[in-house]
Image (cartoon, rainbow, N blue to C red):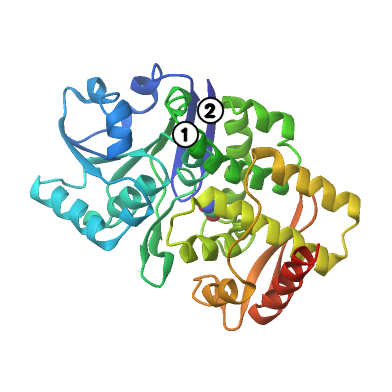
Amino acid sequence: MYELKVRASKTYDITIAEDLSFFSERVMPLVKGESVAIITDDKVNALCGGALDDFFAAKRVIKIVIRHGEKSKDAANFMKIINTLAEHGFTREDTVIAFGGGVVGDLAGFAASTYMRGITLIAVPTTLLAAVDSSVGGKTAIDLNAGKNLCGTFYQPSAVYINTGFLKTLPVKEIKNGLGEVIKYAFLSDTVKDTDIRKRDAALIYKCLKIKRDIVEKDERESGCRALLNFGHTVGHAIEKLSGYKLSHGACVVKGMVYAVEISKRIYGLSDGTVAKMYALLNSGKHDLSCAYSAESIAGQISADKKRYGDSVNFVAVKDLGRAEIVKIKISDLKDMMSDYESSFKSV
Ligand code: GLY
């Protein structure tokens, strides 16, 4: 079992275990009221929906099951959740359990953060992506028509319990989705090696979350270094939106990291050796590194991003593995560098 403490606006523990045997000890003391809402999606519900039931046998439990997929992270489901909590008489004493992947976590977190101005939130991630990234750090959100995560809050959970047993139920596509975020950490810190990435175990999740925890503790509300965690995401989110969310978040982040490497190459004049090392890492999850969208359309989508400042964005560039920095770049310059990259591979 691995443990991490996060000291942000709320102090809480992350538990990484191979099963649920520590759940009673680590989580149940935080579940104080009479009522518990387990928010999950149809896929998780089919595979392991009853896994938490025994722990809450003495509580009044409601289960809210949304359809899996990014399209569910919308205002309609948000309203459905908070209205259901209200109809069942949930009070500030009661608890929301986010039991699922990134979509469930963001949506349930947003609902927990706004219902009665905030009720207890416990995160029980069931995907690699949620385990290594979205369940920790307090970002909650729904998507708007204009773009992903445009409406949300910073709201820390009271506990995060990661059972790696749940990850064994995941299809390859979902593991690859999470590996996109894992590869991101290997760019941000040399503590995550490609040998770790291959193991995909609790130790890897711990290493990734330690990097995230340290950053979140320094800059919970992303006024500075937390933006490093967005490596690959500026372009990645744009591609995700352009695909109508048909491509997974992790797959898009990997494509976004390809652009980030290519842009870093142009900004810093990286050596061939450094770029080769970066591509070895990008290839370590066996993702498709190609992109079907033009620089023009990606740049257009970036203009709708919440991280835009006027005509510029804070872009995460890398000088080497473990040496990322935030640079302010005009979106028009980004577009030019992406077009340059596009024409270079098209001419090969
Ligand atoms: N997923 C990036 C962050 O939590 O800041």
Q: Is residue 99 above or below residue 147?
A: above
Residue shown at the point (49%, 53%) measured from the top left: 247
Under circle 2, the secondary element is strand
Q: What residue type is labelled 1?
A: Asp
Cβ–Cβ under 8 Å for marks 2 and 1 = yes
Residue shown at the point (78%, 48%) measured from the top left: 278
**Residue at far top of view:** 21
Residue shown at the point (66%, 52%) measured from the top left: 289
Q: Quadrant of residue 27?
A: top left
Q: Earlier in the sequence, mark 2 or mark 1?
A: 2
Q: In this view, does 275 lie above or below 161?
A: below
**Residue 258 place in picture, x, y as percent:** 69, 56
Q: Which mark identifies residue 178?
A: none
Density class for disc 2 (Cα within 10 Å; few <14, some 14-19, many ≥20) is some
Q: Which mark identifies residue 3?
A: 2
One can see residue 40 in this view: yes
- Indicate left or right for 181 with 75 as reference: right
Residue matched to label 1: 13
Residue shown at the point (79%, 67%) measured from the top left: 347
